Amino acid sequence: MKLELFNYIDDVMAIYDFHRLELVEINKELKRYFSDKLIGNDEFINIFTRIKSQESLREKLIRRNYFIKYPNPADGFKHIPDLIGLRIECRFIKDEEQIYKKIIEDFRIYTGRGMYASKKNNKIRLNLDDPQPQSLNNGFKIFKLDGEFFTGERTYLFELQIKSLVNVFWGEIDHKILYKNYNYMVTADFFKDIMNSIIDNLTMVDKQLMILYDHVRNLDASVNISAEKQLKTLLSKILHDVFTQKIYDELGLLMNLKTITDVVVNFLFMKSIKNKDLTYGENFISLINRINLASDCEMNIEEPIELKKNPKYYDSFSKGIGEILYVNMNKDLEWNLFFKIICLINEASYSENFTEFLIFVRYEYTLSLLLLFDELDIEDDKKDDLENELLAIVVKSFEKNPSIHFLMDKSLNMFNEFVCKSKKLELKSHDEIIKLFRETYKFN
């Protein structure tokens, strides 16, 4: 025979299961509302939502003595404050207050008990009477708002938190390492000293990150040529760390993605610089945000890539490269990963990204050819013939070695080496140029 407590828990769980589908829809509506509210806000990074798991719900019912406080299971279910949880992430501690002020500006309709409904969606209500930020037992302060979602028939409770990056990290320490760790006990004084030390260090990290952010944000490509290489290297490293972990989580494999992430970064930078309204540093921050969003998406590595539309080819070179890529992108794991990473970050279809990548490849090789033709006194129509002949050799070579490393690293390096030699030798004739290219452009 079960203890009455466990019968009570079973009853609450049955109510939870009955309402779960409605909770899923409410979760989506809350995420959509707050995302729309904060989109375009510079301090805003991301929003995470979750419906309370059964395991977590059981634990809360026992830990908070719901059986004693609310003997009726239906009342107990109604009083669970975080059936749905929302976490809005921003960059720095100082940004938390700005996000908080942005959120509450629409909540002006008083509904009683300290709750205010949104003018844009009166089903969503927040308790604005509690002082913010709230001081927690672990020493940190946090902007945490109790909320209600009124369907017209039933009210569900949710919790909204606003956290900076270091505050998110602190929450993980507190929740997973300390709060959830029942394997050891520490004295109160030792616990307090350790927590204060961690908080002090995280506050220092927050200030250092803010200094780095302000510096990067003010960079401009026109006067910081060396900064481009440094930022690309940093971005590639971030990409590498994010996606090697994702691949390991899905496949259990550790892979070297350096070539892939370097090409991804160059591709993204080419696209981002088209936005003339943003500085170089702002483009960099934008890419960081997109990578952060992509880090929470499934890669589905074992699934093949399907192009919904036929790729667009603008010349014989892009057609030749594209046809080889099309054949290999579901055979070569590196090409497959490359396009999946691009699609996660670039937020476009495989077909669109496939076409844009072909434009990018053409652009990379065209840059080298422009350097060559600037030095040669050749008629325009003959330049076109020479360009087509050189690029046709690249296509044939790529067909024999259809790897991303060859096309975007080794081949480009040999191409640039050929351009440098041609300029030094001051070659003029078509035959001499082709001969030098065949001698320079070789691979094993």
Image (tube, grey):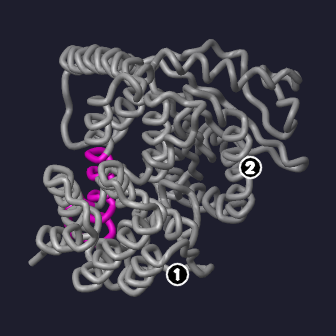
In the depicted structure, whether residue 60 falls above or below residue 96: below
In the depicted structure, whether residue 193 falls above or below residue 80: above
Residue 292 position, x and y percent, is 44, 45
Residue 248 position, x and y percent, is 26, 64
Q: Residues within 10 Å of mark 2 (few under 14, many from 20)?
A: some
Is-magenta flag for residue 71? no
Q: Is residue 239 visible?
A: yes
Q: Quadrant of residue 237?
A: top left
Q: Kindly state the secondary structure of the residue where label 1 is placed.
A: loop
Q: Quadrant of residue 330?
A: bottom left
Q: Nearer the viewer, residue 96 or 76?
A: 96
Q: Tell me the amino acid under the disc marked 1.
A: Glu
Nearer mark to the viewer, of 1 and 2: 1
Is-magenta flag for residue 258? yes
In the visual, does 94 lie left or right of 72? left
Q: Nearer the viewer, residue 266 or 161?
A: 266
Which residue is at 74% across, 59% downward? 22
In the depicted structure, whether residue 436 falls above or below residue 259: below
Which residue is at 25% across, 18% downward? 201
Main secondary structure along the magenta-highlighted residues: helix
Q: Quadrant of residue 127?
A: top right
Residue annotated with mark 2: 29
Please report the bounds of the magenta region as a residue range: 236-259
Q: Residues within 10 Å of mark 1 (few under 14, many from 20)?
A: few
In the visual, does 37 lie left or right of 179? right
As drawn, which residue projects farthest toward the left? Answer: 444
In the depicted structure, whether residue 296 falls above or below residue 319: above
Q: Tell me the amino acid under the disc marked 2.
A: Glu
Residue annotated with mark 1: 306
Residue 151 position, x and y percent, is 85, 48
Which residue is at 56% across, 35% downward? 88
